[in-house]
Image: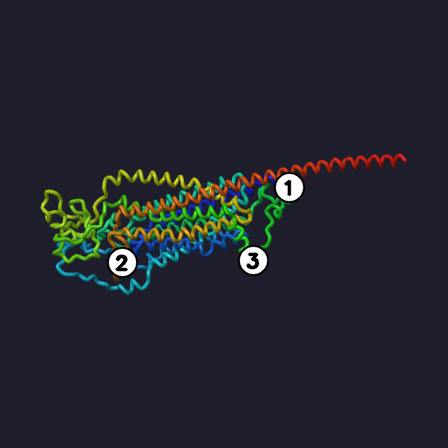
């Protein structure tokens, strides 16, 4: 191959690597941002955690719909352009997720606190009669569940993400030098790690901005980002992520279907002269691998036998089982980690306490009300009414409740203490422990990621070369179906069992959880994650034994083949000696005839 052709191949291949890395970054950013907005979506649409799990799992449903076909048929078509189409679909899905914000009404905070900053009249948080909240507009708001648009957008994101990994990895493995393929795949995976960093950072910034920023007077908002009813500008991040994903589609439209094939990857049936002709020819028709026209009917007929051959590989099957179990643990942990941090390190200790007692028996307080106040004793009460407060001063965020009969501390007469809006600040011990939690999280993530690239290389090396794309597709399909979809759902359902106080919708019915039992949350969340990891280790041991047996068989076969080849070489040498003797005899006879 001429130096010019080599430079062209390297330039195109590097462009593909850069484009694929950016696509990985974009999909990782939008995916991690989705995880970071789980709490915001719960509060905005007033839905429980298990329903959020269904929304999160809808991404995997989108993958499930097309992954096998994209991996099998896409490998025989123009892979870069199919990846570009996938990036476009991801972008449109991300924009669709943000759409409900622009068609739904303004966020209404459930509160009994007077929002007006100009009012100076005091009001009593202790009602003497039951107050029925108005349900005006209830039918209109309940007729359409806006979270359906989030579900559909996430499904579209899943469909669009489908071709990026199997087609991208197989493209690299096909056209890279064999000794460099692992390095390139590792580089792409490394770039993708940066995506979640920016995704969670973007989620943190958007969560601090009020959801209806620009449409409401912030002075009238009586809650802060620390309140369980606060909803951040979740929609803003989706617009940013959608724009980035849209840009990642552009480079793939300009990349070729195939590249020059490395010499060691040519068909062994080719002679050295043919190989040299293919690699050295300056003509364009010989520069790239010859592609036969796609026969969709033939490919469809070969699909089932090919799939049986793939699943009959024990190494591939065990590796699939290990990744499914580990992905259940990983996806469930990652999905609810922001909520865990928020509940465990961002709030004061919470317990199963009785809401009603003698101190608030004179007030007709509502069980459904959630207006947390912090008493002077450092305890958070569900509402000023349940804290036994009888008077208030100030307005908006500056409201202070007086004569709170349920707030009491040592050596103080009950009923003379005050309470302020919002939950009590977290314990000092949380600030001290949190850095250790982050350090352990980073360390565990690093250890887990060490197996990523070797796992991919094991996956593509343990099967026939023509099955690489299908193997990657089936691997992705299985992990999406058996881990990505169910894990967020059953993790969310189990976490819901630790809820202490549920919110209620305007039209009735249970809404989002306002506060959890932090101890129970920690036990079920970390316990389930650890349990799944432990089960996967038993499959790893089985996989190692199968690989060891497979390697021994390969060595035995190689030794047998070596002996056979040695015998063939000896026979060839003997035949060549006989041939030389025969030629010499002919030469002698020829000389005799000439002399005659």
* Mark linked to residue 276: 1
Q: Is residue 279 left or right of residue 227?
A: right
Q: Nearer the viewer, residue 430 or 122?
A: 430
Image point (49%, 54%), residue name: 68
Instruction: Give percent across and percent down for residue 559.
Output: 60, 38
Image point (15%, 45%), residue name: 376
Q: Is residue 572 left or right of residue 350?
A: right
Secondary element type, mark 3: helix
| Gap between marks 1 and 3 measured at Cα | 35 Å
Q: Nearer the viewer, residue 196 or 239?
A: 196
Indicate the quadrant containing the C terminus: top left, top right, bottom left or bottom right: top right
* Residue receiving disc 2: 510
The answer to whether residue 212 of the structure is visible from this angle is yes
Mark 3 closeness class: few <14, some 14–19, many ≥20 residues within 10 Å: few
Q: Is residue 57 above or below residue 538?
A: below
Q: Nearer the viewer, residue 526 or 412?
A: 526
Q: Nearer the viewer, residue 146 or 115?
A: 146
* Residue receiving disc 3: 301
Secondary element type, mark 1: helix
Q: Compare marks 1 and 3 and give the one earlier in the sequence.
A: 1
Instruction: Give percent across and percent down for residue 77.
Output: 54, 53
The answer to whether residue 157 of the structure is visible from this angle is no
Secondary element type, mark 2: strand
Which one is closest to the eye, mark 1 or mark 3?
Answer: 3
Instruction: Give percent across and percent down for residue 546.
Output: 49, 43
Number of numbered discs present? 3
Residue at the extreme bottom? 139
- Residue contact at pointers 1 and 3, CB within 8 angstroms: no
Q: Compare marks 2 and 3 and give the one earlier in the sequence.
A: 3
Indicate the quadrant containing the N terminus: top left, top right, bottom left or bottom right: top right
């Amino acid at each position: 191959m001429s130096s010019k052709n080599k430079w062209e191949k390297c330039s195109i291949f590097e462009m593909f690597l850069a484009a694929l890395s950016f696509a990985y970054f974009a999909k990782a950013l939008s995916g991690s941002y989705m995880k970071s907005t789980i709490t915001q979506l719960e509060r905005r649409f007033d839905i429980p955690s298990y329903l959020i799990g269904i929304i999160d799992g809808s991404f995997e449903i989108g993958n499930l719909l097309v992954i096998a076909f994209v991996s099998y048929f896409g490998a025989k078509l123009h892979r870069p352009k199919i990846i570009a189409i996938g990036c476009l679909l991801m972008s449109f899905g991300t924009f669709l997720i943000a759409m409900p914000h622009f068609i739904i009404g303004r966020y209404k905070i459930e509160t009994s606190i007077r929002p007006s900053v100009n009012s100076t009249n005091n009001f009593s948080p202790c009602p003497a009669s039951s107050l029925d909240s108005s349900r005006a507009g209830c039918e209109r708001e309940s007729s359409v569940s806006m979270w359906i648009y989030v579900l559909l957008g996430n499904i579209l994101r899943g469909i669009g993400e489908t071709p990026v990994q199997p087609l991208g990895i197989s493209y690299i493995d096909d056209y890279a030098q064999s000794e460099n393929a692992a390095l390139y795949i590792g580089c792409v995976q490394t770039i993708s790690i940066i995506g979640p960093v920016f995704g969670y950072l973007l989620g943190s910034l958007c969560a601090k901005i009020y959801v209806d920023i620009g449409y409401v007077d912030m002075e009238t908002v009586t809650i802060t980002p620390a309140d369980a009813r606060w909803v951040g500008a979740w929609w803003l991040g989706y617009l940013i992520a959608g724009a980035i994903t849209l840009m990642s589609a552009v480079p793939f439209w300009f990349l070729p279907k195939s590249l020059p094939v490395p010499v060691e990857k040519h068909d062994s049936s080719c002679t050295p002269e043919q190989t040299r002709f293919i690699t050295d020819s300056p003509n364009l028709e010989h520069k790239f691998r010859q592609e036969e026209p796609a026969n969709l009917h033939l490919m469809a007929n070969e699909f089932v036998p090919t799939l049986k051959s793939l699943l009959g590989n024990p190494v591939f099957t065990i590796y699939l089982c290990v990744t499914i179990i580990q992905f259940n643990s990983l996806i469930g942990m990652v999905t609810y980690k922001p909520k865990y941090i928020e509940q465990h390190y961002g709030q004061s200790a919470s317990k199963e306490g009785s809401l009603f007692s003698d101190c608030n028996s004179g007030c007709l307080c509502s069980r459904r009300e959630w207006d947390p106040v912090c008493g002077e004793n450092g305890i958070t009460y569900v509402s000023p009414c349940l804290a036994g407060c009888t008077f208030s001063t100030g307005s908006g965020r500056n409201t202070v409740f007086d004569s709170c009969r349920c707030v009491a501390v040592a050596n103080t007469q009950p009923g003379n203490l005050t309470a302020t809006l919002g939950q009590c600040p977290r314990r000092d011990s949380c600030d001290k422990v949190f850095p250790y939690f982050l350090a352990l999280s980073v360390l565990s993530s690093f250890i887990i990621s060490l197996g990523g690239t070797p796992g991919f290389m094991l996956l593509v090396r343990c099967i026939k070369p023509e099955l690489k794309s299908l193997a990657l597709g089936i691997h992705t399909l299985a992990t999406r179906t058996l881990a990505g979809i169910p894990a967020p759902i059953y993790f969310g359902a189990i976490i819901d069992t630790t809820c202490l106080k549920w919110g209620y919708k305007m039209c009735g019915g249970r809404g989002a959880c306002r506060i959890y039992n932090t101890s129970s949350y920690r036990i079920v969340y970390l316990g389930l994650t650890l349990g799944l990891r432990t089960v996967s280790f038993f499959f790893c041991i089985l996989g190692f034994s199968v690989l060891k047996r497979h390697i021994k068989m390969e060595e035995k076969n190689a030794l047998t083949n070596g002996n056979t080849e040695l015998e063939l070489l000896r026979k060839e040498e003997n035949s060549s000696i006989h041939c030389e003797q025969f030629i010499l005899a002919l030469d002698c006879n020829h000389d005799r005839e000439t002399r005659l």
